[in-house]
Image (tube, grey):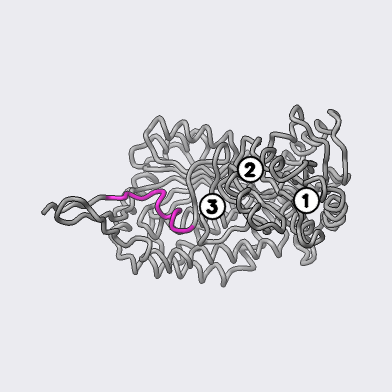
Amino acid sequence: MSHYQSINPATGEVEQQFETLGDLEIEPILAEASHGYRLWRSAPLADRRVIIKRAAELCRERSESLASIVTAEMGKPIVQARGEVSIWASIFDYFADNAEKFLEDERLEIMGGGEAWVRTDSIGVLLGIMPWNFPYYQAARFIAPNLMLGNAIILKHAPNCPRSALAIAEILRDAGVPAGVYTNVFATNDQVATMLADDRIQGVSLTGSERAGSAVGEIAGRHMKKYVLELGGSDPFIVVDPADMKAAAQAAAIGRMTNAGQVCTASKRFIVVESAYDEFVRQFALAIEKYQPGDPLSESTVLGPLSTAVAVDELEGQVADAVEAGATILVAGGRVAGPGNFFKPTVLADVTPEMRAYSEELFGPVAVVYRVADLGEAVALANTSPFGLAASLFGTDDASLRAAAEDLDFGMVWINGISRSAPDLPFGGVKRSGVGRELSRYGMYEFANKKLVRIPA
């Protein structure tokens, strides 16, 4: 059986299969990428810009077909799938439009005479390892800045979204990206390790699980390769005294249920101060219950299936473990009988440290609510997580919320808003949520040679 299969999560049917790369194909791919890099890095920035802008145009022109692929492969509701295509295009536009500014030489004020400046150069061929939950968006935030910088890319996508991977490659090819500059590979984990060990690969970017990040980081470190890891999250949503409790609860529901909760930055732990707890839980339950599983091709569906049957099993096991250990069910959901990987929203309370749901990432439509005395206790509880990706704070006292934001050990903090991605905002976490940043100018510098040039007096 092929390792790369397109299986419709709404029906469980295998729609298409693809053979994995042969071991003898690795060397020609690396050789072509190395040659493509040398040509691409020498191309004028203006020429690279034209190609990346054209890729953004093609995304928009083919939006409907691109969105339908994502819906069929990982179950994303069609409206959300169109939104993912849109942000893909916006990321390409952003880096095409801003690369010249980001890559300007930086003149240094030096103590000695003469001149010194730092220029930003490409470093070579990069390996990308991408996930299934946002097949286009998460690939785009790696691809766009690095192609504009002049790097070349070999990209291994998730085994359950091969058609999405091929669609990305087709867009780039049709936009004019030369052969070898972007290469899609249906590779095994062993083949990825082989490529990463090769001297022609200069860096690796992975978005995925903590386990995968640890494995890739270990190999990259052993071979002295730069790496960026965007891993999991168990993001807190802290409720103090929002001006509009209903609106805050609705935001919480959106933050938890978008993409069926299969988002690394999704709000997962809802930490509520005592004075707001009862009303928030009431409003939150009402908002959550509106998210009922449905056909992801329907325009009205807001909650599609989980990506795989294995994902349903994992989430069901985490919920069962919590309930058996004494957790309270506030909203009863769970596996939906019949074809497809559907899971009804579930809300738990009274979750304690010995339960899996306390420390593990819940990658699906399951929320955990905690009751705390005050904002200080909320921040302390939020910081107990081994993850540190994104956090949200809802309240009316601006000064206390800003102070709490400074105390939260997370890579991104939102005040009176839920975590949203945008091309001009740096994305990344701390602790076990990863290493490095993507998007904005910071994302363009991760795989860059910050080269000092010095002319003495």
Q: How crowded is the residue under tag 3: few (<14 C-alpha within 10 Å), some, or many (20+)?
A: many
The residue at which mark 3 appears reads as 427
Q: In the drawing, does residue 144 fall left or right of residue 132? A: left
Instruction: Check the image and report above or below for 210 versus 81.
Output: above
Name which residue lies at 77% across and 67% down. 299
Mark 2, secondary structure of its residue:
loop
- Residues shaded magenta: 440-451
Name which residue lies at 64% across and 49% down. 391
Q: Amino acid at mark 2?
A: Gly
Q: Amino acid at mark 3?
A: Phe
Mark 3, secondary structure of its residue:
loop
The residue at which mark 2 appears reads as 233
The residue at which mark 1 appears reads as 11
Q: How crowded is the residue under tag 1: few (<14 C-alpha within 10 Å), some, or many (20+)?
A: some
Q: Nearer the viewer, residue 371 or 58?
A: 371
Point out the frontmost of discs 1 and 2. 2
Point out the frontmost of discs 1 and 3. 3
